[in-house]
Every structure is written in C-alpha cells, then in structure tokens.
Amino acid sequence: MATFQELYETLLKASVQRGQASADSVKGLDYDPQHLDCLLHPEKHPVIWQLADCDCPPDAPCMASCEFDAISRKEGVPRVAIDVTRCVGCAACAESCRSGKLTASKDILPALEAVRNAKGLAYALIAPAFQGQFSPDVTPGMLRSAFLKLGFDGMLEVALFADILTLKEAFEFDQNIHKEEDFQLTSCCCPLWIAMLRKSYSQLMPHVPGAVSPMIACGRAVKALHPDAVTVFVGPCLAKKSEAREPDLKGAVDYVLTFEEMRDVFDAAGIDPSEMEDKERDHSSRAGRIYAHTGGVSEAVRSTVERLNPHRKITVKTQQADGVRNCKEMLAALTAGNTHANFYEGMGCVGGCVGGPKAIIDKEQGRDNVVAYGEQALYPTPMDNPYVIELLHRLGIDTVETLLNDSDIFIRKL
C-alpha cells in the first residue's frame, strides 16, 4: 500500500503538472481512502490528522504535549480524539508522536484548484517571516514572480497590515494607559497567545484591545476591495489554519499553506524562486516587518507610540515571552500582581513566528533575516508610511475613531 507521503506527492504532481488532483489521478495506486479524503477535503478534518491506528498508552506523549487539553484517547481505542473547540493547531502533538502517525493538515490541493478556477483575482498573502525561507537569494520581488507563474494574480506582504494593526494598538495605548498601574496586552499577532488568554486567563481580557491578526486583516481587506477574490495565506504557522476556521473569522482567508507546503509546490512545478524576475514593491514599514520575531510587536508599538506622542509622561515599557509555557508563566505572574511593564507581548513559538513549526530555516537565521529586512524599509513606523493612509482611505477608514471602534475589517470581539 502506498504511504501517505507517496499519495501526497502523486496528487501534488498531478495538480501542478496536469491541473487536476482527484481519485482519477491515483488510479492503479493502492492507498488508504482516508488519506485521499484528508488531502482532497482537508476542511472536513481537524488540523491534525491521525494517519493510522496506534497502540500507544492513554498517557502517550502526544497527549502530554498538548497545553490546551485538546487531545485524548480512551484505553482500548486505537485512535485519538481531537477536540476542535480546544485545538489551536500548535502541532506539539504531531511533533511528539513517536509512532509518526500524527501529521499536520495539508491544504495544497484544494488551494491550487481554487486559484485555477477563481472567478476573480487570486492573491498570495505572505507572512512577515518569509525572508530567506525559500533561498537566501530570493527577494520579495522574485517570490512575487514565482506566485504569478503559479497562477496567482499577485502577492501581498502581510507586514503592511501589521503596520495598520501596530497603528491601532499604538493609538489604544496612547488613549488608555495613563497611570503606572495601567497595562495593555498585545492582541493581534499570535493565535496561540490569544487562545491562552481566552481559555485560561479570561480575567485579563479587558486589557486586550479587540483586533484581528494581520493575516485576517489582509484577507478581509482584499475581500472588501475584491469580493470574488481567492486569498491564500503562506507562513510558518500551523495554528493559522485553525485561526482561519474560527466562526467569527471564517471567510477572510480561504486557504492557509505553510512554508513547507509552498516549497513542495515550487518543487513539483519546477519553479526556482531565486531565478525569477525581481518584481520589487516596497509598501511596509520597519514596524510591520519585524513582527515575525520575539519582541518585534513590542518594538513596533513602542516606536509608533513615541512617534505619535513624543511627550508622553508614561512611556511604553515592554515585556515579552515566547513559547507556550513561558507565556503562561508571564501571565501567571501578571495575574499575581507582579507587573514590571505596561505592554505585554506573547508568542506561542520560541523565537516568535520565525520559530514556527513549519518554518524552513532555523529561527536564529530567520530572526536575522527579518531584522535585516526591517532595516531596509523606507519608513520606520506606520505613522511615516503613506501606503497605510492610502489603504485605509480606500477601505473607507478616514478617522482614528473608525479604526479603533467601527471597522469591520480590523476589529474583533475577543
């Protein structure tokens, strides 16, 4: 019988070379029908797939690794149960599975089909952590050309929408933090961080401004301007697949692919991004670009608040934590009254997004790349970025009050 990986590679090759991936593509191949259904219809399944029965004990490592109590198994039952209301897609269970029978969702096949059959435009939304992931020599313009060759109509850097959300959080800090004991928690970047707050530290939610993530903001903005568009987010984070499915966010991003999945597509299609034409466009500021590493959001908000109100008596004092356990320790200290800052940032992965489970390069190199790309930006903060104001105007957002209180694109009721 063909392995799951063999079935995946066969279907991917059929999709990129013949434009079709279906049961007909694997005629003559002996395979597990469940594997085929997962690959062709990932939306019907949890973000983590169990590929085969296992004989692990009820206290198996996959269950012990889950910080959100989303995975369980009854004794004598050869399959785990994944509670989709608790699972945030962190992939800790799959990474700790000793039998190799848990794997992350792969959404390539329906995503490519949707791009090919799009009634309107199809956009790749690239995460701020993308620098150097596909090759050290690949510029944003080369990557844009690679997406165009695959059939996309364009590539958008999600960092531009990180700019807008930085501006939003900076305005909120300036409006709300007036005493030494006041504090704000970053609200928009990491789905694992938001899940921790909502599930385990709900008493802190009044300190979290309601905002969507840059990914959701980008998808919603595209849909507002082009209602028939297909939006495909590409990044290092598996949890973004779960985030895109959340009931109040669903519809903004049609598909989420990881950097690893995108590399598979380029390889199957024979596309080397480093050999593509450099279609350079520069829209994001340094603040939006550095979101991808630990401390990046804090630095972005701090620098933007200073630019917004340089004479504030109470300045931004930041504290960061990365990794789920470190985030929980910081939040536990905060709830106990051990406050040493007024702006708290949490990232579910060690190193931040560059340390995501589906990043291609190591997190240290990823951080260096993100920092270097930030330094190349023409604008230091979203306050200085004319593209931010232009985009907000196009979306009908002409006042600070609308951005903070009345925007259906950037606001989420947490």
Image (spheres, rainbow, N blue to C red):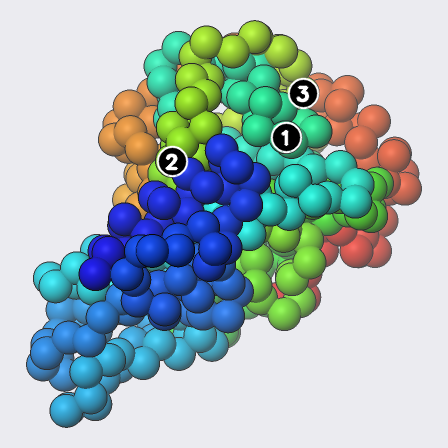
Label 2 is placed on what type of residue?
Asp
Q: Secondary structure at mark 1?
A: loop
- Residue at point 58% right, 18% down? 145
Give the answer, above or below, for where 44 lies relative to 192.
below
Residue 188 location in percent, x, y?
57, 50
Q: Which mark is residue 264?
A: 2
Q: Which mark is residue 283?
A: 3
Residue 123 location in percent, x, y?
66, 36
Label 1 is placed on what type of residue?
Gly
Number of residues whose C-alpha sits closer than 10 Å to that of mark 2, classed few (under 14), some (14–19) or many (20 or more): some
- Residue at point 63% right, 52% down? 254
- The answer to whether 80 appears left or right of 411 in the picture is left
Indicate the quadrant containing the N terminus: top left, top right, bottom left or bottom right: bottom left
Residue 412 location in percent, x, y?
68, 60
Q: CA distance from mark 3 to mark 2?
A: 28 Å
- Residue at point 80% right, 52% down? 407
- The answer to whether 31 appears left or right of 65 in the picture is right
Mark 3 or 2: the one toward you: 2
Q: Which badge, 3 or 2, is on the more N-terminal residue?
A: 2
The residue tagged 1 is 151
Q: Which badge, 2 or 1, is on the more N-terminal residue?
A: 1
Give the answer, above or below, for where 412 lies relative to 45.
above
Number of residues whose C-alpha sits closer than 10 Å to that of mark 3, classed few (under 14), some (14–19) or many (20 or more): some
Give the answer, above or below, for where 82 lies relative to 162.
below
> Is any part of residue 225 visible from this angle?
yes
